[in-house]
Image (spheres, rainbow, N blue to C red):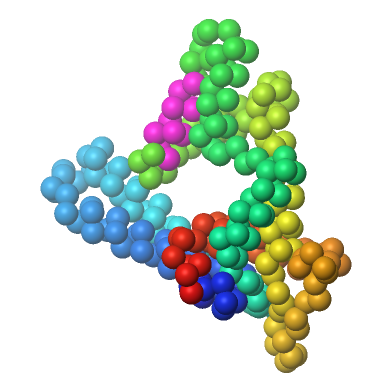
Amino acid sequence: MTVPVSPRHPVQWSARLEAEEVLRQVRTECEALQARLAALSPVEPGSTEDQARAALLAASEAAVAAAEGQVARTVDRVVYSVAVPTRAERARVRREVNAAGCTYPDDTTLRATLRAGVEEGIEPGELQDRLLAAIDAVETALVAGEVIPADAAESYGELHARMRRAFPRYATLLADREYYLDMVPAMIAAAFVRGETRPGRPAETYPRGEDGRVADAILDRIEARGDLQPLGMWIVNRLMQLPADVDRD
């Protein structure tokens, strides 16, 4: 993936470039994990600690294999040209996102609300204990970078479905997240995508309106390819988070 260096120079995005970037990240993480494990003191083969280390490494290697598979399966149809937003443009778009009422509840907030739903809506007893234990197990695994135990994952999935129906605060947070993912990628892409290149065709520059945004018809075309949400969220997560010194060029 092209590293953004200046608002003057557009960068490129495509599904394959995204997949390759993910692969680089998970390979780096796997290599770092391998180094950490190699530096640990040896343990008894077959012991609980030995099995835990093996499971952690296996999960990391599985992530690498999955990322390699994604790269192999992804064939670029289109490469998009994206403008790097200036500081003022980033501030303006964030204001528009806030004005549209778009908020993204993070996973920590969702888990805390699930916990509140269990404590408030389920009588103390075996069921409440099992569900709270599942939340604890998920949080512990995520913090430690470990694989979520299968029984905890199953209970957590059941809890998610149950609370979505029965606990309005949790349902509202999920609706907020879904609204954000529906709205924000399109808003961001409309502001910063500039054109596209397809194999065997000349580069196309998208027409923009007086407000500097591309038309809905262009966004519809990008969405029909399945690229709108990943493209928009890449801009959100990478280009909207640039350090201030980018603006000095």
Q: What residue sits 72% from the left and 87% below the top?
A: 203
Res. 234 visible in picture:
no
Q: Is residue 105 above or below residue 218?
A: above
Location of residue 154 in the rendering, given as x and y in whole percent from the top left corner: 55, 33
Residue under the point 53% across and 26% down: 112
User: Is 122 placed above or below 81 here?
Assistant: above
**For residue 61, which quarter of the picture?**
bottom left
Which is nearer the eye, 141 or 116?
116
Q: Nearer the viewer, residue 131 or 17?
A: 17
Q: How would you classify the magenta stretch by its main secondary structure?
A: helix
Residue at the limit of the structure toward the top, as seen here: 124
How far from the left and from the top, in percent, is residue 27? 39, 65
Question: At x 16% / y 44%, what residue is drawn?
Answer: 43
In the current view of this chain or complex, which residue is farthest to the left? 41
Q: Quadrant of residue 219?
A: bottom right
Near-viewer residue (219 or 40): 219
Rendered position, 159 above or below 9: above
Magenta residues, as a range?
132-142
**Residue 111 in view:** yes
Q: Is residue 34 left or right of residue 190?
A: left
Location of residue 90 in the rendering, given as x and y in whole percent from the top left corner: 60, 57
